[in-house]
Image (spheres, grey):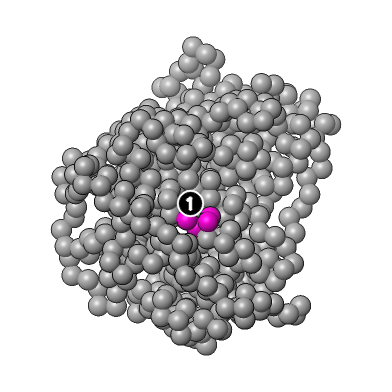
Amino acid sequence: MSSRRKFIKTASMATAGMAVGNWSASAKSYNRIVGANSKVNLACIGIGNRGGEILNTLNDTGLANIVALCDIDMGAPHTQKNMEKFSGAKRFQDFREMLDKSGNEIEAVSVGVPDFSHFPITMMAMALGKHVYVEKPMARTFNEVELMMAGARKYSKVVTQMGNQGHSEANYFQFKAWKDAGIIKDVTAITAHMNSPRRWHGWDTSIKKFPAAEPVPSTLDWDDWLAAAQWHDYNHDYHLGQWRCWYDFGMGALGDWGAHILDTAHQFLELGLPNEVTSLKAEGHNDYFFPMSTTLLFRFPRRKNMPAVDITWYDGVNNIPAVPEGYGVSELDPNIPPTGTGKIQPAKLNPGKIIYSKELTFKGGSHGSTLSIIPEEKAKAMAAKLPVVPQSTSNHYANFLLACSGKEKTRSPFEIAGPLSQVFCLGVIAQRLNDRLLFDRETKRITNNHFADALLTGMPPRKGWEQYYKV
């Protein structure tokens, strides 16, 4: 691993090297309008596991024509089924080759690859005038997200959507309707929790080095898999979802689930970026992979006429937050007594949130799950005051494709999803350093820790990948 001094120096050089690039989409690419009865010509990058689910769900809308498939492991078992299903689509192992050779046939791309590879694919696609659907979180580092937002502003005719399914389901429309009607107001605190087992639970937290090199599978292009990331010798614990465990590749439980739990609160409460992030708990903290359990405190200042908000994030199997009386959870550990505040602590919670305002408390799940007012007696008293919640006109995938056709606007474009993703980037830095970070929302810099500030950018890209860091 690099020393902190070397890391700060190289990260600073990477930041200084970012400039305005000379890529530009052709007028033909920008001005191609999908006909009223036509499908969007879609290329899918990442076609196994989660990428394959995205491919199939986009196809199921009936609004896409799958013209190209791209995956760094096209011969693997997890990609074979989709290769056979979409046998008429062109096949590529390198997204750069695909966009170079078949770019004129492609109007939009889906990006269903590991977090650290979202960035270069998205930047190249936008620069070539391709609409982009990219999985959450948008990117692995704060600065990559910043550049993606800048790219979306520059290539303003490109449609962007971060994959965040709940942002087009009942939770999105309910939260907006309740906020507009004044039901949700004066929120001061949110508890967010995701306590399911994670891939790294059970690993040795006394780790002193990265895993040993193993033979690369014959079908896998490992160099392309790494993309702009610094070189790591192949090990199975980096591949097929295991990348999410490592600071160098993924964003842990927070990056995986944070958007599914906090997206509507972040947007409709206009939270923006926090001014402070503190690691309150990091059980099993080490320099390589994510803690066994984490508690993070995000502090957001006053916005307009809305009070400051504290969000406390809990992950880890045994890191269960306290919940208010009347929460309604039946699965309780009898060995955990109520606290002195009258709150009870359930043995297990499904992923979700508790939203505390000055007058009301709301309970909610993840993804598209709707909110309910607690306790039940209060919900009954409020029932007559609740507004009608409009129905969604399209799911998240159809919303993207309809936006490509000019029929709708995406609900999670980069301008909305970017700051949300950056919140999680800041949280991961606090996890990684197990420290308290002070963040200047105006300059977008961490002011009390030089190493943490360098992590906003991270290590520079590998040689040959620098061009994607120019807007």
Q: Residue furthest bottom?
A: 88
Residue beneath the point at 48% across and 65% down? 122
Q: Which residue is mark 1?
A: 146
Residue beneath the point at 72% across and 42% down? 176
Magenta-colored span: 145-150
Q: How many circles with numbers are drawn on the protein?
A: 1
- In the rendered image, residue 449, in percent from the top left (x then y), is placed at 32, 33
Residue beneath the point at 16% across and 62% down? 213
Which residue is nearer to you in this view: 404 or 16? 16
Helix, strand or loop for disc 1: helix
- In the rendered image, residue 261, in percent from the top left (x then y), is placed at 55, 43
Residue beneath the point at 22% across and 42% down? 4
Q: Is residue 135 above or below residue 297?
A: below
Quarter of the image for residue 40 reads: bottom right
- In the rendered image, residue 315, in percent from the top left (x then y), is placed at 42, 37
| Other residues around mark 1 within 10 Å, as few (<14) / some (14–19) / many (≥20) | many
Whether residue 330 is visible: no
Which residue is nearer to you in this view: 66 or 440? 440
147 within the magenta span: yes
Quarter of the image for residue 393 reads: bottom right
Q: Residue furthest top?
A: 340
| Magenta highlight: main SS | helix
354 within the magenta span: no
Whether residue 429 is visible: yes
Q: Is residue 295 above or below residue 263?
A: above
- 243 vs 349, left or right, is left
Q: Is residue 91 above or below residue 273?
A: below
- Label 1 sits on what residue type? Glu
- 188 vs 294, left or right, is right
- In the rendered image, residue 281, in percent from the top left (x then y), is placed at 35, 29
